[in-house]
Amino acid sequence: MSPRGQHAHPVDRAGIAAGLNGCRDDLHTLMAAATPAQLRGHSNGTKWTNEQLLFHMVFGFLIVRRLLPLVRVMSRLPRWVGRSFAWLLDAGRVPLHWVNYAGSCGGALVFNQARMGRLCDHTIDHLVTSLEQEPEDRLGRWMPFPTSWDPYFEPHMTLASVYAYPALHYAHHRKQLTLGT
């Protein structure tokens, strides 16, 4: 891991933005083609319906909006603070997974097929604009992450890798949808 605030090469902002926008386009395609019965159908490998899983996929983008300020702050604090924070979050993984599950069940009731696309658009627009305005030196800043929360969380994540994370999360869960499209 390079020192905080430093990275070996410029961040591929266009590639990250393309990944985010590709997820948005895919979500709109899925939502336009899905029938109400397909959305109520079970996903593959989760306890969620397809609609609940779609909301969970969008929720990944929402979480990143909240993680970005956290990384900016934690990357400036003594390393023991970040390690302790990541340890504490890892220790709370059981209730987190329950909240994550229940939150996506409830979130799909509010942000259903009719509203989920707009939420995704607004969130990705914000992320892309924020990424474009982020100073290059800040994109290399990092903090420890709770690796038990998500298979795409790494022990140390840079601000750039946090911007890229929701596209990985989306692609992972995209394979679990059973919409037939």
Image (cartoon, rainbow, N blue to C red):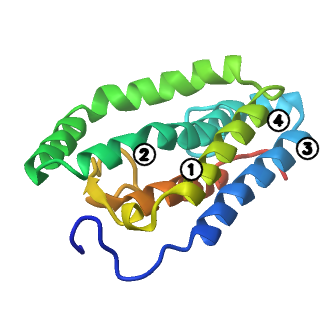
Residue under label 2? 68
Mark 1 belongs to which amino acid? Answer: Ser
Q: Which residue is mark 3?
A: 33
Which residue is label 4 attached to?
38
User: Which quadrant of the structure image shows residue 41?
Assistant: top right
Determine whether label 2 and label 4 are within 8 Å by CB: no
> As drawn, which residue projects farthest toward the bottom?
8
Specify whether 97 is left or right of 123. Answer: left
Q: Are marks 2 and 3 in contact (CB under 8 Å)?
A: no
Which residue type does callout 3 highlight? Ala
Q: Earlier in the sequence, mark 3 or mark 1?
A: 3
For discs 3 and 1, the disc positioned in front in the rendered view: 1
Choose the circle earlier in sequence order: 4 or 3.
3
> Which-is-in-front pick, marks 2 and 4?
2
Name the residue beneath numbered marker 1: 130
- Horizontal and vertical percent position of residue 84: 12, 42
C-alpha span from label 2 to label 3? 33 Å
Percent position (x, y) of residue 3? 21, 71
Which amino acid type corresponds to the residue marked 4 in the rendered image?
Gln
Labels 2, 1: front one: 1
Between the C-alphas of marks 3 and 1, the distance is 31 Å
Q: Are marks 2 and 1 in contact (CB under 8 Å)?
A: yes
Question: Badge 3: how crowded within 10 Å, few (<14), some, or many (20+)?
Answer: few
Measuring 18% from the left and 40% from the top, which residue is drawn there?
Answer: 85
Cα separation between marks 4 and 3? 10 Å
Element class at badge 4: helix
Is 87 displayed left or right of 53 in the figure? left
Please report whichever mark, 2 or 4, sits nearer to the chain's N-terminal start.
Answer: 4
